[in-house]
Amino acid sequence: MIEILSPVELERAQDAGALVGRILQTVRDRCRVGTNLLEIDRWTKELIDDAGAVSCYVDYAPSFGSGPFGHYICTSVNDAVLHGLPRDYALADGDLLTLDLAVSLHRIVADSAVSFVVGQDAHPEDLAMIDATERALAAGIAAARPGAKVGDLSHAIGAVLTDAGYSVNTQFGGHGVGSTMHQDPHIANAGRPGRGYTLRPGLLLAIEPWVMADTDELVTDADGWTLRSATGARTAHSEHTVAITDDGARILTLRP
Ligand code: MG
Ligand code: MG
């Protein structure tokens, strides 16, 4: 299903996006060496509840997970890259943490993810990997305008990741957003330009490049949710929800 939002729904989407950006920034600012992933989950629940929003994750039970997820945010550390199930783990100096959050506010969903290094002991290669996903996200957003094809976004994202030396997994990627979290079109993080669905004003897209340092192969953790690099290599992930407008893509999930 592909939803095209009305102007009123787009205004609600702005509010949902702003809330997701604000929660991610708040939680990120609170993360310290020693912060427990379950604490992050608790903070997120409180912030969602305070805003009168609804978690897209807590009851989420897709075919690929051993659902329901039962938590409010994805916390993926080091070799974990997607769907990181919060667990009893205290962050260490130099850990590479990805926070991924989707909430529904007034029945419109926004979805965003950010990777960062906790503490002072950042590996330069981790910072380079985060930077590559952020540049790929910017390239995908720049390519997202009315009349563009989904393949144009995939190509723009994949070119940045490939040029930076990463191999790209196309199994999980970006997606349409609207009244539910995951909708068509799927936006693979590599692909050929000129192919696929044509973008129209009113479309909401979650664009989300992610990479693993030396592989494109994933393994599922024993928790049934967390996806890790098959080699144990570290990983990064950047995501924004954007609205396609007559003037191009507007980022809804900017962090304050
Ligand atoms: Mg997400
Ligand atoms: Mg997403």
Image (cartoon, grey):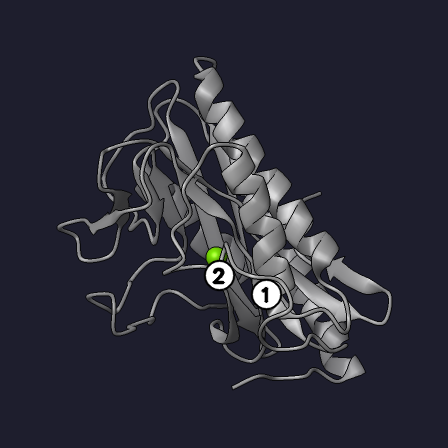
Q: Secondary structure at mark 2?
A: loop
- Whether residue 211 is visible, yes or no, is yes
How many neighbours does mark 1 have within 10 angstroms: few (below 14), some (14-19), or many (20 or more)?
A: many
Q: Nearer the viewer, residue 26 or 111?
A: 111
Farthest residue to the left: give it: 222
Q: Is residue 54 left or right of residue 160?
A: left
The amino acid marked with disc number 1 is Gly
Tell me which label, 1 or 2, sits earlier in the chain.
1
Using the image, tell me which numbered label, if any, was put on residue 169: none
Specify the quadrant that holds the C terminus: top right
Report the residue at 57% width, 83% height from top. 2
Q: Position of residue 3 (x, y in %)?
A: 61, 84
Q: Which residue is mark 2?
A: 188
Q: Position of residue 170 (x, y in %)?
A: 41, 57
Q: Nearer the viewer, mark 1 or mark 2?
A: 1
Q: Which residue is mark 1?
A: 151
Above or below, 1 relative to 84: below
